[in-house]
């Protein structure tokens, strides 16, 4: 099992090899900002990889296209950005993503 440390939340979660960062977060009851629902079409879930970039599966063409269209390819590579809905874990990694928080149960009145 890999460990994903999420900053600034200061939370470390376990993840099975091959799951995405976002899938692992959801499995641990965390809300991860997204607009497209994890389809890799927006950049709402983008996070910067602080450590362990080598422990993520290589970036696919679709992920790079989405990020580069929004931010430019040079900025994506320089800042170590990945889409959490596409980045598959293969070992320990530390990422920074503001807005990640414990999911709150919906209440209906």
Image (cartoon, rainbow, N blue to C red):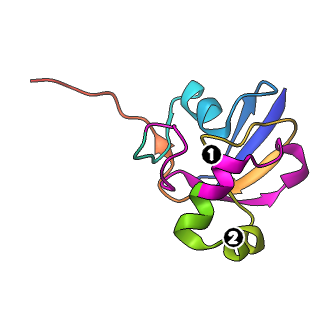
Residue 66 in which image quadrant? bottom right
How many numbered callouts?
2
Q: Quadrant of the C terminus?
A: top left
- The relative height of residue 56 versus residue 13 in the rendered view (above or below) is below
Mark 2 or mark 1, earlier in chain? 2
Where residue 14 appears, as percent x and y from the top left, is 75, 30
In the figure, is residue 90 to the left or right of 80? right
Residue 40 in which image quadrant? top right
- The relative height of residue 3 versus residue 16 in the rendered view (above or below) is below
- The residue sitting at 85% across, 42% down in the picture is 92
In the figure, is residue 32 to the left or right of 105? right
- The residue sitting at 76% across, 68% down in the picture is 77
Where residue 42 appears, as percent x and y from the top left, is 48, 52
The answer to whether residue 8 is seen in the rendering is no
Label 2: element kind: helix
Where residue 59 appears, as percent x and y from the top left, is 76, 49
Label 1: element kind: loop
What residue would you read off at disc 1?
84
Characterize the local packing of mark 2: few (<14), some (14-19) or many (20 or more) Cα atoms within 10 angstroms.
some
Judging depth in this view, the residue of 65 and 42 nearest the camera is 65
What residue would you read off at disc 2?
73
User: Which stretch did the figure color magenta?
Assistant: 37-65
């Amino acid at each position: 099992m890999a460990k994903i440390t999420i900053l600034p939340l200061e939370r470390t979660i376990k993840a099975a090899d091959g799951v995405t960062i976002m899938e692992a977060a959801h499995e641990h009851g965390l809300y991860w900002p997204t607009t497209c629902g994890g389809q890799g079409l927006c950049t709402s879930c983008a996070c910067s990889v602080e450590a362990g970039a080598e422990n993520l599966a290589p970036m696919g063409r679709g992920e790079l296209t989405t990020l580069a269209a929004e931010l430019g390819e040079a900025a994506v590579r320089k800042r170590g950005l990945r889409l959490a809905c596409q980045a598959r874990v293969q070992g320990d990694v530390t990422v920074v993503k503001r807005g990640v928080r414990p999911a709150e149960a919906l209440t209906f009145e």
